[in-house]
Image (tube, rainbow, N blue to C red):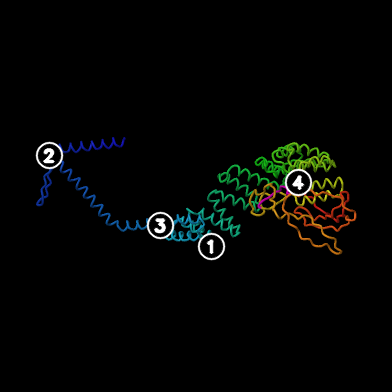
Amino acid sequence: MWRLIIFLALLAALAFGVAWLADQPGDITLAIPNYVTVHTSLFGAVGAVLAAAVVLSLAWSAFRLIFRIPSIFNYARHARRRRKGYDALTRGMVAAGAGDARAARKAANEASRHLPKEPLSLLLNAQVAQLSGDRAAAQSAFSAMAKREETKLLGLRGLHIEAQRRGDEEAANQFAREAHRIAALPWAGEAVVSHQAAHADWEGALATVEANARAKAIDVATAQRERAVLETAIAQQRELTDPEGALKLATSAAKRAPDLVPATALAARLMTRRGSLRAAAKMIEKAYAREPHPDLAEAYLDIRAGDSNADRYTRAKTLARLAPDHIESRLMLARAALATRDFDAARTAIAPLIGADARPTVRVCVLMADIEEAQFGETGAVREWLTRGSRAPRDPAWIADGVVSALWAPVSPVTGKLDAFRWTTPVEQIGLAPPEPVLAPVAPAAPRTIEPIAIEATPEPEPELAPAPIEEAKAEPVIIDPPPAARPVVFPLPTPPDDPGAEPDGETRRRAY
């Protein structure tokens, strides 16, 4: 609306000016001696000047156009090449994303021909080389990108990945450090921290984490978790040489990551050595109520050195009240009660774990075998529980990249990744479970070799111990394949429950608890 009003106003002003000029009296005479003399009005003179200006402008434009024809053709040719190059880049990126290496290579060659200095052409060539498995070409493309300022970080990341693929850790660390000096990128910071942690440079890794946090390359939660893990690692390293410094680090780690059990257990252990028993107990109780863990239970029972088994049992009951139905609480109570030879209390604590609907784990089965052996001696029930333990589900453990460990570690032993260990249950592999005991006939010489029978990893019903004739009690023993967490166990043929069976030679089993 305003534009229309302004246009009409300008048009009215122009009409008014033309009318005023036409109404002005007077003549203008232009005389060129011996050539021409022109007489005209003021309005005509103004019109002639304007017409001459238009003609001169058109002539000048035509003159410039004639001299610019080569540059115009050159510009059009470059524009056409750029259009073809970008079309080829588009086709190449789509083909590389779809996994069509042949089409991507063809498009990359065309893009390189039309756009030889375009950064995207270098990126497409690198992607095609990676897709085709040509590591040398990928290395060359990323090296070319690393030499240009606008693509330096992209090239360094590509070189870092290629160095990791060929197993050159030092080169990968060098590229990551160079990229980290230029900009605090998440991938570069993580790579530097992982390399430092893999080489036990805990202080250097902690400094790098602090730098990443200040640059906001990692979020606050991740920074706190990594700080806690590294502080725990340093505290473990200084536990014997600098107990006070280790205690400060472990306490700080426990505050930063309350679910980091090793930090809490270490801090409580160091407090116990210093004599701060009440503070250590409160720290463990708070952590155990949130996440029951055998390491916390062990640290809690060992708070006061020299305590009797009865005192330890009392302390176990205090801690178990915080998580009464958890398996760790029941195992802790049963083990503490067994140490006091209160067999009824031990059986009561472990009863829900061996019920009809329960599936006892290895630790539960071995603990039941210990209870049976401590109360009745070497009986058939002991061997029965050990047999069940050889096929029972595994208990939770510290696992990182497929490695099962009884102890926590700050980094993975496979990849060197920081904070890789998790407390979880190992995956059971169906069809690879230990075989059932197989009876072999008595041979006059050596026992006959028995081929193992593969069974599925499902719970077996408890065998009924039927009385057997006395003459069968002297049968030849049979050795089965050892379970994952136990030594070879010698099992005789079925005998009466009160018959101790064959005398074991040496240590017959290893406690899995």
Residue that label 1 marks: 136
Residue 91 showing in the rendered view? yes
Q: CA distance from mark 3 to mark 4?
A: 69 Å
Disc 2 to disc 4, C-alpha distance? 122 Å
The image shows residue 133 at horizontal and vertical percentages of 54, 61
Q: Quadrant of the N terminus?
A: top left
Q: Is residue 335 above or below residue 68?
A: above
Tell whether position 375 is magenta: no
| Residue type beneath disc 3 | Lys
Marker disc for residue 84: 3
Circle 2 residue: 26
In the picture, measured across the screen, residue 303 lies left or right of residue 263, that is right
Residue at the image position 70 percent from the left and 39 percent from the top:
287
153, 8: nearer the viewer:
8
Question: Closer to us: mark 3 or mark 4?
Answer: 4
Residue drawn at x 78%, y 53% as measured from the top left = 486
